[in-house]
């Protein structure tokens, strides 16, 4: 079959996690529940989530507010570094910042992250086969959200690094046949009260 139907990809970062990242905080659980409430009217066919506890718990709480939408564990939706650039790819004014940020990434992590990034693009992006539009949610981590948004905007591979995503914020990308991808929403926290917004962001980037 030919990819003739539109895919709507809904992306979110897990809710706020505890210091050891093994579970969600009370605020993180509430963030997930509120996102589930926001998505109740969306005809989701699946909720995919990364394998780490903070993503799995977020997905389960979101799905608990939906009507029988199945959960699918996905290794490619895990917490990976999708791409490590060389110095010559980076703007001179920010090269040191970028390289320092990724300095501790091992060769094995680079290879694993690059493979997961390729598989995520193949699995979650682009139009779909058939006649019916598809709506899917991926509960993941900030790096993958940045990578998929970067790809939708046809930005250089290194550009994922400067795309931030708050906990339980919502990003939506539309993939329609014969058209470039459209980023319909990015980092939208409209479903969260003020006290639950902007967690996961560096303090200097938080919007009040």
Image: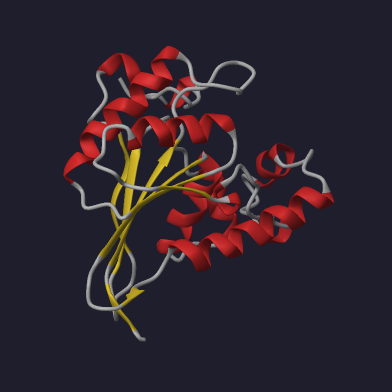
Residue in front for this viewpoint, 67 or 186: 67
Q: Is residue 48 visible?
A: yes
Left or right of 103: which side holds 97? left
Q: Is residue 151 above or below residue 200?
A: below
Left or right of 119: which side holds 164? left
Q: Where is residue 32 drawn, in percent x and y?
A: 36, 28
Left or right of 144: which side holds 127? left
Residue in front for this viewpoint, 180 or 41: 41
- Furthest-front residue in this view: 68
Which image quadrant is residue 153 in?
bottom left
Name which residue lies at 31% across and 55% down: 45
Q: Is residue 67 above or below residue 120?
A: above
Q: How is the image coloured?
A: secondary structure
Q: Where is residue 39 drawn, in percent x and y?
A: 24, 40
Residue in front for this viewpoint, 27 or 92: 27
- Furthest-right residue in this view: 107
């Amino acid at each position: 079959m030919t990819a003739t139907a539109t895919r709507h990809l809904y992306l979110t970062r897990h809710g706020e996690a505890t210091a050891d990242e093994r579970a969600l905080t009370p605020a993180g659980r509430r963030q997930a529940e509120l996102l589930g409430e926001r998505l109740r009217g969306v005809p989701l066919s699946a909720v995919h989530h990364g394998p780490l506890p903070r993503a799995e718990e977020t997905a389960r709480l979101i799905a608990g507010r939906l009507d029988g939408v199945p959960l699918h564990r996905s290794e490619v939706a895990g917490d990976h570094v999708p791409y490590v650039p060389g110095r010559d790819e980076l703007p001179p004014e920010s090269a040191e910042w970028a390289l320092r940020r990724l300095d501790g990434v091992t060769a094995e992590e680079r290879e694993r992250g690059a493979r997961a990034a390729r598989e995520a693009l193949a699995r979650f992006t682009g139009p779909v086969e058939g006649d019916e539009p598809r709506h899917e949610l991926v509960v993941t981590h900030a790096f993958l959200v940045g990578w998929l948004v970067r790809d939708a905007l046809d930005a250089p591979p290194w550009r994922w690094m400067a795309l931030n995503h708050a906990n339980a914020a919502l990003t939506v990308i539309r993939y329609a046949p014969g058209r470039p991808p459209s980023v319909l929403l990015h980092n939208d926290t409209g479903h969260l009260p003020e006290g639950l917004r902007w967690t996961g962001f560096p303090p200097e980037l938080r919007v009040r």
